[in-house]
Amino acid sequence: MRRLLIAGNWKMNTLRETATALAGALAEAYPQEPDSVEILVCPPFPYLLPVRDAIDGSAVQLGAQNAYHEAPGAYTGEVALDMLLDVGCRWVIVGHSERRHVLGESDELLNKKVQAALAKGLNVIYCVGEKLEQREADQTEQVLDHQMETGLAGCSGDALAKLVVAYEPVWAIGTGVRATKEQAESAHKHLREWLASRYNAELAEQTRILYGGSVKAGDDQQKQETYELLCQPNVDGALVGGASLKAEEFKAIIEAGERAAQAGTNA
Ligand code: PGA
């Protein structure tokens, strides 16, 4: 049984006051971890420390949105993995589509980041996902295979114990157009099969695969859709952007996860 993970990717949003207020509201709501759901927030770098203090002693975990793979040194503007560990981060997101397509991070660079972060003992959320034109050209699975192959190159099965994969179709991110539960389930199943064939069935069974891209819970219909998405057998949680910036909406997504876990439809 895989524990659901509901992760908030705050991107380049919040200021110190809004970041700590948001984190504080979540910490207050979740002094203890709900049954079967882990909760994570990934604030911008400058607010990692104040957010850490705001969630201290609660069930909310702390992650970063990016890091550089090299040891501390002359890399102007970058943040080392040791620094993340030093401020209490247990998680780091690698390969988000905005890093791939807006900031131009290459497959090779992402592979170095994945390897270095896992070697440091961090939990890694490795993001993959196709662009709209790739889906329309029926290349989704090829794109996912390529991103998995390149991103995880050189990683042994043992090294992947702390890996979480996030399927984030680029066309669904920030657009309000979420993948249907069938589209998500099909991609997740494919990713799990990739893990089974490239590594082994046990690793594939244990690895959590999150869905990301316009996951919302702003009204009853969205709550229901999120619940149904999280009930898919191969969907093990969500990586949430915009909706993670509103405490009430993020809590509603966590609640949808709790209900899905209770329904027991996940593998
Ligand atoms: P969104 O972003 O929920 O705002 O679509 C998701 C993500 O980019 O992780």
Image (tube, rainbow, N blue to C red):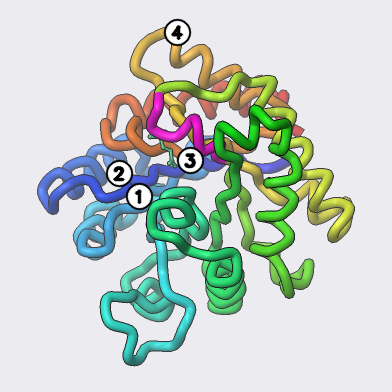
The circle drawn on residue 221 is: 4
Give, as a three-letter code, the residue at label 1.
Answer: Ser
Residue 71 is situated, as x and y percent measured from the top left of the image, at: 44, 88
Which residue is located at x 46 percent, y 25 percent?
255
Q: Looking at the image, tell me whether mark 3 or mark 4 is earlier in sequence order.
A: 4
Earlier in the chain: of badge 2 and badge 4, it is 2
Mark with earlier residue (1, 3): 1
User: Which residue type carries mark 3?
Assistant: Leu
- Does the magenta segment cover residue 174? yes
Q: Which residue is pictured at 34% across the width and 30% down the height?
A: 243
Residue 226: x and y, percent? 51, 21
Q: How far is mark 3 from mark 4, CA to CA? A: 19 Å
Residue 58 tag number: 1
* Residue 205 drawn above or below residue 78: above
Q: Quadrant of residue 244?
A: top left
Outermost residue, top side: 221
Looking at the picture, which amino acid does disc 4 mark? Gln
Helix, strand or loop for disc 4: helix
**Which span is picked out in magenta?**
168-175
| Magenta-drawn stretch, dominant element (helix, strand or loop) | loop
* Above-or-below relation of 191 to 94: above
